[in-house]
Amino acid sequence: MTSMLVDNIALLVTNDALHGSLTAERSAAAVVIEHGLVAWVGDAVDAPAADERIDADGRCVIPGFVDSHSHLVFAGDRADEFEHRMTGQAYAAGGIRRTVAATRAATDADLLANAGRLVAEMRAQGTTTVEIKSGYGLSVADEERSVAIARRLTAETTYLGAHVVPPEFTDDPAGYVELVTGEMLAACAPHARWIDVFCETGAFDEDQARAILRAGQAVGLGARMHAGQLGVSGGVRLAVELGAASVDHCTFLADADVDALAAGDTVATLLPGVEFSTRQPYPDARRLIDAGVTVAIATDCNPGSSFTSSMPFCIAVAVRDLRMSPAEALWAATAGGARSLWRDDVGVIAVGKRADLVLLDAPSYVHLAYRPGVPLVHRVITG
Ligand code: NIG
Ligand code: FE
């Protein structure tokens, strides 16, 4: 039996709801890990002996980031689109089809290598749990292999056959919805935990989104939703109505959407890398938090709208531009992400939970936003 003591922690963020405040911080703390789980949390002076000791040397220790929204299974990139956007062109979701063409042409090995490289980037920046979606295959075989490749990298896999209607179905969107809810779902469900749909003008409307999510729920998948990225739609309320775990983007919201989110259990996941990279207006995090909505932050890492793998970057933008406090942003990037994945074993440092810890080269997590772009992740401990 090997136990490990992480000692000499200047500031420990536990997110342990038992201890009151949002981030439930402790100073001069220590943590003991056994069998990949947290076995003890307390004051450093009371720390029990362990087989191994890591000296945090006055650093801040936080739970590993939970990145609850990413699209990592793809080939190629779209740097040219980004370049054009930065000189004035608007974001067009039509670019998704370019990545679909590149992804279909790639080998399984190339797709796995690319996704694996991005997961490694995330890990180096403190992410210890990541959700990965399909959605650039859009045929039965290409969606199936996309979810299967994602499954090799994470347990949090999402089937997003309903990303956009692929070119060969342009004249028959209803036929595509039938495929997504039929043969494609049957092929992908064994590899997936979640089903997602992009409910937006130019992608899928509310009736289609309802049919797609219900079909997934009927075979045991949890529901997630992309909505409110480009304009107000009924997608947000639909997500709440269907009991979706999360509705993501939430950049454009009607008052009724905020009321529905506040009354329901669906997490609002904000993706500030998207607005940063598309020059759209940022979502109104204060309006959501002040209404009592549970907010998560994720990267949405994808080659079109947000090609960042960095949760620290997203936290910095959330603090500066979404006006979240550093504590709110850190909670949203850890415990909030966990909530959006219906997980209670991650995003928190408490006895019995997974031992996913990040040691920061800083005395406080405030530095994540205060020192944007600086690699502050000193060490990542996972399980
Ligand atoms: O979450 N909104 C739809 N899907 C992605 C964008 C994908 C792309 O542009 O390739 C998103 O932003
Ligand atoms: Fe997305």
Image: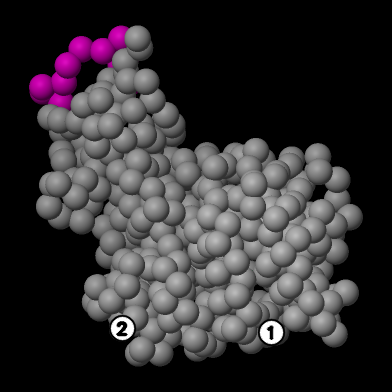
Side of 283 where 179 appears, left or right: right
Tell me what residue is drawn at x 77 percent, y 81 percent.
Answer: 173
Taking the magenta stretch, the answer to whether it contains residue 46 is yes
Q: 357 or 350, which is in the foreground?
A: 350
Residue 311 in view of the camera:
no
Against 173, residue 27 (above or below) is: above
Residue range (magenta)? 44-58
Q: Position of residue 43 (x, y in %)?
A: 12, 29
Q: Quadrant of residue 71?
A: bottom right
Relative depth, front residue between 321 and 181: 181
Occupied quadrant, residue 303: bottom right
* Image: 237 above or below 246: below
What residue does disc 2 label? 259
Label 1 neighbour load within 10 Å: few <14, some 14-19, many 20+: few
**In the rendering, at what x and y percent does residue 38 appear?**
29, 29
Q: Quadrant of the N terminus?
A: top left
Q: Is residue 67 magenta?
A: no
Residue 92 percent location from the top left of the image: 70, 81
**Residue 383 % position (x, y):** 42, 29
